Each structure stands twice: as structure tokens, then as C-alpha cells.
Amino acid sequence: MPHRETSLSLTLRPIEGATVLLLDGEVDVATAEHLTDAVRDLTAPGAVVIDMSGVSFMDSSGVRALLDAEELATGAGRPFAIVNPSRAVVRLLDLIDLRARFVELPGLDERAIARLGRPPTTDTD
């Protein structure tokens, strides 16, 4: 069986109140460690948001890396969320019943990011 090359591009994009880590490519056994290393190496304050719109494939190693990234961020007192998960990511997280585990933002809305980590408000009126 021929060896299949995989690649993952990670781009850091600071926005107000967060660092967005944009993933593009495959998050698998060959690349998953890059995700956790990138989150571990973040020094800017604020939330950690993983934009998964460019993920074309993810296996169980990618899921483990996502869980580890969440643990690294929240362990450092930083809110963690995913945004724009691709069909490949949604399919896998739904299959293993972990999608609800993550805070999932519909987009990079600064108001939604600012609310990360805050308790929900209740209307008393």
C-alpha cells in the first residue's frame, strides 16, 4: 500500500478578545500534534478559537488533538470554541457523539467571542 502524504496548514489570526487558529487540510495521525503544539505555544491572552472550515479530513487522532487543545486552553483559564466546522468534522463529531462537547460558534462574531467564558445572562423583566 503506498504511503499517503497528508498536510495541515495552521494560521494564527488575532482578533479582539481571541486568537483564531485557522486549520486547512487533514487533521490525522501525521498532523494532529501540530494542533496541540500551536495551542500550547499561544501567548496572547483571550479565547482560543479553532476555525475548522478548511478541514478536509479528520480521524480519531484529530479528535484527540481537539480534546487536548480544549484542555490546554481551559486549563490556562482561556475560553475555547470551534467555529465553522467542515462537513468532515461535523460528520465525525456527530458519529462519536462529541459535537455537543465543544462550544461551537456560527462565525467569528466579536460579540459571541466576547461572551465566551461568561455565564449566560437571564432576563428578569
Image (spheres, grey):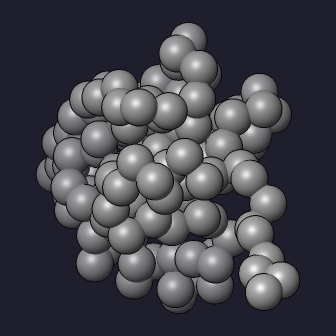
Q: Is residue 40 above or below residue 108?
A: above
Tell me where residue 77 appears, x and y as whole percent.
Answer: 78, 32
Residue 55 visible here: yes
User: Hey, which quadrant is residue 52 in on the image?
Assistant: bottom left
Q: Residue at x 40, y 48 (%)?
A: 110
Q: Is residue 107 above or below residue 91?
A: above
Q: Residue at x 51, y 67 (%)?
A: 104
Q: Is residue 113 above or below residue 42?
A: below
Horizontal relation, residue 100 to residue 92: left or right: right
Q: Quadrant of the N terminus?
A: bottom left
Could you say which is closer to the camera, residue 22 or residue 109?
109
Residue 3 visible here: no
Q: How many marks?
A: 0
Q: Quadrant of the C terminus?
A: bottom right
Tell me where residue 4 appears, x and y as whole percent.
Answer: 18, 49
Could you say which is closer to the camera, residue 82 or residue 16?
16
Horizontal relation, residue 30 to residue 98: left or right: left
Q: Residue at x 68, y 70 (%)?
A: 101
